[in-house]
Amino acid sequence: MSKTIQIRVDDNLKTASDKLFEELGTSTNEAIKMFLKKAIRTKSIPFSISINDFNETTIEAFEEVEKIKNNNSDFEGYQSSEDLFNELGL
């Protein structure tokens, strides 16, 4: 037996999600089912939710800044922008 869940979303959101999931070889409906199954299996929302929704690279940069500020890093720094550009091969 199955039940129906109905949700309303913006037309642009529906169109974009349909396109994305078709490219991934599935449908928006199947992706929603996957979300629900993973939520049940993990007993959680299966992705991070935060007010500051930074990506992993940004979070790593923040952590590195904190290490540098607290002198807990092997960060050597540069004496000039020319030294930095030379290091980068520019």
Image (tube, rainbow, N blue to C red):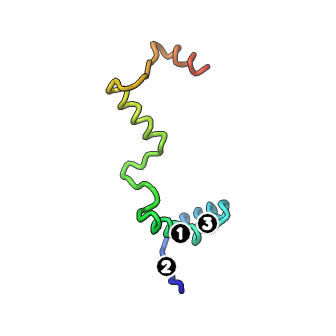
Badge 3: residue crowd in 10 Å (few <14, some 14–19, many ≥20): some
For numbered disc 3, what is the local secondary structure?
A: helix
Whole-angstrom CA distance, mark 1 to mark 2, is 10 Å
Going 41% across and 63% down the picture, which residue do you hit?
Answer: 44
Residue 16 at x, y = what percent? 59, 62
Badge 1: residue crowd in 10 Å (few <14, some 14–19, many ≥20): few
Residue 3 visible here: yes
For numbered disc 2, what is the local secondary structure?
A: loop
The label number, if any, that marks residue 59 in the structure image:
none
Return the residue at label 2.
5
Which one is in front, 10 or 2? 2
Residue 13 at x, y = what percent? 54, 64
Which one is in front, 28 or 19? 28
Residue 90 visible here: no
Tag 2: residue type?
A: Ile
Return the residue at label 1.
32
Which residue is farthest bottom?
Answer: 1
Q: Which of marks 3 and 2 is nearer the N terminus?
A: 2
The label number, if any, that marks residue 18 in the structure image:
3
- Do the residues bearing badges 1 and 2 touch, measured as CB atoms within 8 Å? yes
Q: In this view, does 90 lie above or below 21?
A: above
Q: In this view, does 52 lie above or below 37?
A: above
In the rendered view of the protein, which quadrant contains the C terminus?
A: top right
Q: Please indicate whether residue 51 sits to the left or right of residue 2 in the image.
A: left
In the rendered view of the protein, which quadrant contains the N terminus?
A: bottom right
